[in-house]
Image (tube, rainbow, N blue to C red):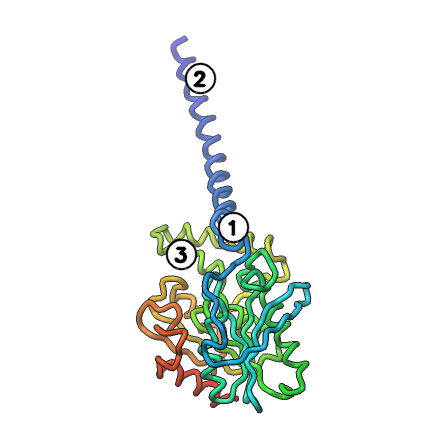
Amino acid sequence: MVLRPRRRRRSVVKRVLVALSVLIPILVVGGMAILPSVIMGPMINGHVSFSTVYEARDYGLEARELTLVTDDDYTISAFEVDVADPKAVIIFISGIHNPSVTAFFGHARVLADHGYASILYDMRAHGKSEGEVVSLGYLETRDTRAVVDYILGQERYRGIPIVVFGLSMGGAVAINSAGQVPEIDGVVSVSAYSSWEDVFYDSMLDMGLPRFVATMQKPFVKLYSLIRFGWDTRNNYPSAQVTNLGDRPALVMHSEDDSQVPFANFLRIMEQAPSHVQAWTRPGDEHFFTSDFLHPENDPEYLEAILRFLEDNF
């Protein structure tokens, strides 16, 4: 009679432990599956309207405003800065939430002085472009495609090289676009991430989470991206698309202590890049790579590197 309660208690404890051994992994997996939508949702859902937009005339430029349509029916806003007999056309692409692509008018002005035309476009869900979801570089290659098609359709640009120049997420889109659009002749990428799940992973490490936890989270971030943007986008990220450059020239820049897109992303991209791809790094935490992004002429080393890359290749 004395042993029965003990046996009963042991049986209850055993059932509780078994239940916990099943329940805890389910809760952990469920939490990891939900986390990407909780963190990424506010970042990508909604249109990005910029508080500061720059005018071409502020830089002594005349810009033609364009309205282009992508192959999936998004209307894209762009600005064209033309020059006589251009050496190349530079397509400028900005970041995920800032700045407006009009912040590149300073670059466009300096490059115009050296014989390069420019088209600055706002990605889908940015500025005057249509869209309510930021696609993290997975779908924005279609926006670049629309700009390239416009260039190819203009007689004055016939036979002129096309170079994409992107910052941050725009840098990722620039690499992805070159990988997807063979008519692009070259790339300048500043502070690009190697993939969105890599950024998520690096951010978790920066928060002090154990490496194994961050590693376990990456497949769930990838899954969330595939659900949002489609199975066809599964390889549309820079460390994969950079391998499609072939012999086309590229210049990849990154600051060594970048707190927004950690330097590890640069290393992953360069690890997969063809051997001829040029790399330039700087010490410090400067996500825009130069301290005076609006006026690149105030950073002669930065400007000289860009002009040298363009002159050597185009």
Single out the mark in the foreground, 1 or 3: 1
Residue 96: x %, y % from top left: 49, 62
The residue under label 1 is 41
Q: In the rendered structure, which amino acid carries the disc numbered 1?
A: Gly
Residue positioned most to the left: 284
Q: In the rendered structure, which amino acid carries the disc numbered 2?
A: Arg
Which comes before the other along the chain, label 1 or label 3?
A: 1
Which comes before the other along the chain, label 2 or label 1?
A: 2
Q: Quadrant of residue 7?
A: top left
Which comes before the other along the chain, label 3 or label 2?
A: 2
Who's the residue at 45% across and 56% down the image? 200
Q: Is residue 97 above or below residue 36?
A: below
In which quadrant will I find the N terminus?
top left
Q: In the rendered structure, which amino acid carries the disc numbered 3?
A: Ser
Q: Which mark is residue 8?
A: 2
Q: Is residue 165 left or right of residue 288?
A: right
Secondary element type, mark 1? helix
The residue under label 3 is 203
